[in-house]
């Protein structure tokens, strides 16, 4: 029995999560997936109801679940709140408390949506990259950090980039393991020519890679990687990198596909337990209109089945269904183009469920 905690969150979160839950329930009803779903509060919706973006009861449920399906958090309504109770704290709190150190962000271009990319179709056609980003260490968490006033009265901001060997090795292993199931190529991104911390990063990657003789390991400086992502993105299979470099590169890679409403993500702990969510935010501009694209969240369920629940066949069933729906020309507003049929969030969820039949 798989225990899944559903956290819809704010804005379009509840709308897209409802469609992903529909897919999960269909897998339960028709394909024998053993499933127990629990629902919880997170983000602004949780703040409104409880005064906290991550109440103890949600955290306890998250700890007890095998996997978490999250929509999105945030919105203008909560922007003036103290930073300690802002919706984003709910998300960051979950990541930190659950030790979700490995962020997996695939950037895949569906050939049916090749026109959506700002890059030429011949550059992005067939694009299928997995970015593995370290999520709980590096400069975003390193100490000391802050803003101090110098003797001359000028202020100085400072942060610390720090990685232990064990932190590098464990994210490296995630990347190598994933590469074994894909194209067997890992490109480790660093700035080893300037930053000692990433000199160590490269050394540990090479050492760890020796345990994976079937995987080809290459290295690239982050500035070159940014350039190569827009120049010749198909050269990459799996990219593994630090928290900050991954933050930037994964957004860049996502945009190569042109459609934020299509991209799922996973954040995993050391045991493979994970939180799954679309990469987009709560999209307050379209919330409540029934037009949000639920495919990123539905594809996050496919990632959940593959990486935590060990149900790769069902994961493929979802991914195939999404392809089929796109083949038939059905599109939500964000990916709609001439000659395709515009449908809403619920209709898109229904179409995916129908396309799962076989
Ligand atoms: P956003 O991703 O919410 O929206 C950016 C643009 O993309 C908007 O025009 C939106 O309408 C569109 N869009 C996003 N998802 C879509 C979907 N599924 N279907 C169709 N169109 C979609 O980013 P933003 O506007 O910068 O942020 C809005 C709020 O979301 C902010 O409060 C921000 O802090 C929060 N946010 C949350 C997360 C998260 O929960 N993981 C991530 C990013 C932003």
Image (spheres, rainbow, N blue to C red):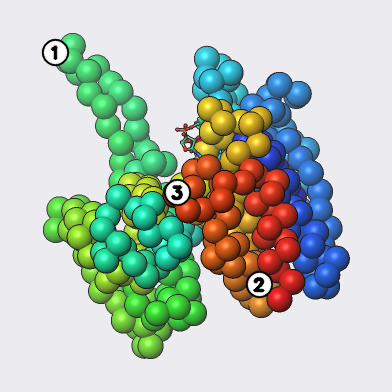
Label 1 environment density (alpha carbons within 10 Å; few <14, some 14–19, many ≥20):
few
Q: Which of 192 and 119 is in front in this view?
A: 119
The mark closer to the camera, 1 or 2, is 2
| Sequence-wise first label, 2 or 3 | 2
The answer to whether mark 1 and mark 2 are in CB contact below 8 A is: no
* C-alpha span from label 1 to label 2: 64 Å
- Image quadrant of residue 229? bottom left
Farthest residue, direction front: 339
| Sequence-wise first label, 3 or 1 | 1
Please give left or right for residue 40 compared with residue 167 in the image: right
Q: Which of 92 and 73 is in front in this view?
A: 73
- Whether ligand 1 has any atom under 8 Å from the Cβ at mark 1 is answered as no
Please give left or right for residue 119 compared with residue 53 in the image: left
Quarter of the rendering occupied by the C terminus: bottom right
- Residue 53: where, in percent of width, then height? 65, 29
The residue where tag 3 is placed is 337
The mark closer to the camera, 2 or 3, is 3
Farthest residue, direction bottom: 214
Please give left or right for residue 175 compared with residue 57 in the image: left
The residue where tag 1 is placed is 152
- Whether ligand 1 has any atom under 8 Å from the Cβ at mark 2 is answered as no
- Image quadrant of residue 205? bottom left
Quarter of the rendering occupied by the N terminus: bottom right
Secondary-structure class at tag 3? loop
- Residue 201: where, in percent of width, then height? 30, 62
Q: Which residue is drawn at 75% across and 24% down?
A: 50
| Sequence-wise first label, 1 or 2 | 1
Q: Nearer the viewer, residue 116 or 207?
A: 116
Please give left or right for residue 36 compared with residue 55 in the image: right
**Residue 317 disc label:** 2
* C-alpha span from label 2 to label 3: 26 Å
* C-alpha span from label 3 to label 1: 59 Å
């Amino acid at each position: 029995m798989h225990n899944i905690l559903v956290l819809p969150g704010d804005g379009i979160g509840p709308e897209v999560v409802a469609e992903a839950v529909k897919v999960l329930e269909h897998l339960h009803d028709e394909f024998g997936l053993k499933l127990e779903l629990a629902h919880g509060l997170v983000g602004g919706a949780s703040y409104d109801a409880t005064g906290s973006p991550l109440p103890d009861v949600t955290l306890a449920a998250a700890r007890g679940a095998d996997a978490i399906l999250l929509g999105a958090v945030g919105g203008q309504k909560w922007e003036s709140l103290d930073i300690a109770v802002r919706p984003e704290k709910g998300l960051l709190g979950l990541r930190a408390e659950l030790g979700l150190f490995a962020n997996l962000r695939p950037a895949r271009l569906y050939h049916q949506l090749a026109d959506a990319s700002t890059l030429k179709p011949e550059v992005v056609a067939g694009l299928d990259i997995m970015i593995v980003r370290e999520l709980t260490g590096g400069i975003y968490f390193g100490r000391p950090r802050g803003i101090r006033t110098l003797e001359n009265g000028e202020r100085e901001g400072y942060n610390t980039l720090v990685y232990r060997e064990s932190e590098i090795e464990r994210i490296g292993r995630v990347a190598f393991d994933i590469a074994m199931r894909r194209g067997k190529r890992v490109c480790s991104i660093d700035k080893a020519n300037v930053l000692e911390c990433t000199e160590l990063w490269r050394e540990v990657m090479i050492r760890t890679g020796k345990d994976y003789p079937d995987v080809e390991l290459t290295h690239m400086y982050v500035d070159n990687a940014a350039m190569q992502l827009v120049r010749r993105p198909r050269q990459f299979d799996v990219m593994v990198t630090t928290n900050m470099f991954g933050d930037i590169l994964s957004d860049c890679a996502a945009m190569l596909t042109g459609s934020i409403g299509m991209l799922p993500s996973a954040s995993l702990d050391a045991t493979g337990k994970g939180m799954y969510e679309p990469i987009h935010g709560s999209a307050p501009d379209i919330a409540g209109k029934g037009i949000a694209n639920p495919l990123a969240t539905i594809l996050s369920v496919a990632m959940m089945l593959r990486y935590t629940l060990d149900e790769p066949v069902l994961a493929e069933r979802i991914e195939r269904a999404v392809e089929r729906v796109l083949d038939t020309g059905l599109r939500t507003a964000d990916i709609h183009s001439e000659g395709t049929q515009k449908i809403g969030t619920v209709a898109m969820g229904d179409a995916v469920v129908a396309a799962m039949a076989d």
